[in-house]
Image: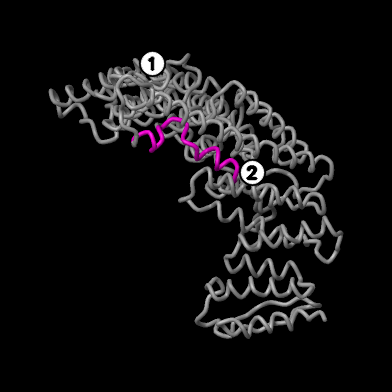
Amino acid sequence: MKMSVKAVLALVAVRSTHAFVVVPRTGSSFSLQCRRSSVCSSDCPASVRYRRSAIAVASSNGTDVDTSTVINDLTSGGDVEQAEAELRRMLRTYRVDGDMSFKPSPEAFECVILALLRQSYDDGLSPVTIASIAARAESLVDDMELMYQPNGVLYRKLINVWCAVAMREDLDAPSTMQHQVEEVEGTAVMDDLHEDTRGKSFDRAKRAARHSLEILDRMEQLFIETGNDDMMPGVTQYKNCINAWKLLGSDEADDVIRRVVERRDKLFSRAGVVPNSTPKERIHSHKDVLQVVRQLNSKDLSKRLVYRRYGRKVQKAADGSEVVIDNGYPGVVTSTHNYNIIIDALAKSGNPWAGLQAEAILEYMVDQYQSSQNSYIKPNAITVNSCINAWAQSSTRDSAPRAEAILDKVAAWRHDGKLKDVNADASSYNSIIKAWSLSRNGGGDAARHAERILERMEKDPRVTPDEISYSSVLNAYAKQSVRDNRAADKAEQLLLRMYQEHKSHPEKHVAPNVRCFNAALDAHSNSRDRSSGRR
């Protein structure tokens, strides 16, 4: 004889160490509550054991248990693995026997998938573990698609998790395993381990980036086919996907980024999210600047800008008082402060056209200041640094030389009298050094370009290199030493020069810090030169 849901759960509750009661809901659904709820949390061991026992007894007695309620109760109690196992058991039974009572509901799928993805947010997890969680969640989304249409939240969160896997893979620093291997004279053990570890990290990052791209493609196709706004990928998903591929640093990655950007702009233009998405190479008016703001489509940016009411009209009454006949409209004030905020937002957006737009706004500010001599729109050091940073953060291949070109423009404007008292500072040079260290356009010698900027900085009487300047160049050599054995020697020479200059003139030159020494050590540990270990 089949037992009712309440009877089964009541039976298990009696056997449990805690006293549980069944609280009926609408229809035949129910929830589980502990009478000791004031002192007992839902994720206590006894509670978890009770849930597992309830499912086991209900299954053995042929009781039809509401899947959404049971699975939701398991996940809310922290027993995600058991909830996933129960969901997959129901799927197998439904597919083999065709029993509709075992068909999982959409809520059951969503509950388990979201619970799995929440587990991946733990900063202590390795990329391999997060990839495993993402793969399990994606397989459930695939199963769900055979029965229902998943909502857009599941796709978006899955894209973000796969991108996080790709971006957590350290493609440059040696694995901790490498430091545990003793150096063996006359063998290639360390070299092979270096190559094997980096190759595996790169492959994992590439697989994760491909997963994110595939899900992004599915969302775009669903949005085009159904017109459902919930299926449209958000700005964050495009940004994360672009950044994940950018880290791979290959020609294939450049092609993928270009295609993703083109599809994004086309899709957003169609949906009315980013009108006229093609960036302007020249800014001719304040309206063009506002067009850039609309392209960014950032609520945070809108909140930071300073507004003023325009078009306000008043009329004097017979008694001499003023009567407002038109309250006007709020508009973004034309000011250096607002333009700096917009350029900074461009730098943080991750858009490939961010550097182009930031430089166009900078040139417009210089032209406006020269023609009107209005100090309210005069560029300052913050403007220059933000523009350089926008190019440095751009995903285009020419980002580093374009960032460096801003320095030449500022110098030319100062020489021509357009910006007499605006100079590049240490932050400007450091951003360019970082851009070159991350660049793929250095012909395999990006670190040398970074040191060239450092040398230019040392010759500029208005700035003084700091610890960040030297450590950034040393880190660039550390990355390059994987492919070029000479890079480790150059890093050591730079560290030695830094030390000697500080020793001779401590008031003019900074001393090497821990980061500088660590970067030089990394350069030797990354090098395939057998003498690097001893050095």
Tell me where the magenta segment starts and ends, as one range: 161-179
Q: Is residue 421 visible?
A: no
Left or right: where does residue 135 sit relative to residue 44? right
Q: Nearer the viewer, residue 172 or 99?
A: 99
Query: What colouring method underlies this structural image?
Result: one colour
**Percent x, y for residue 218?**
75, 40
Mark 2 or 1, nearer chain start: 2
Location of mark 2 (residue): 159
**Residue drawn 53% across the image and 47% down it:** 129
Q: Is residue 141 above or below residue 408?
A: below
Instruction: Judge whether residue 177 is colored magenta.
Output: yes
Circle 1 crowding by C-alpha within 10 Å: few under 14, some 14–19, many from 20:
few
Disc 2 + disc 1, Cβ < 8 Å: no
The disc labelled 1 sits on which kind of residue?
A: His
Mark 2 or mark 1, whichever is nearer to me: 2
Taking depth in this image into account, of 213 and 356 the one nearest to the observer is 213
Which numbered marker is on residue 415?
Answer: 1
The residue depicted at 61 percent of the width and 30 percent of the height is 285
Mark 2: which secondary structure? helix
**Left or right, residue 463 beside residue 435:** left
Q: Looking at the image, can residue 419 be seen?
A: yes
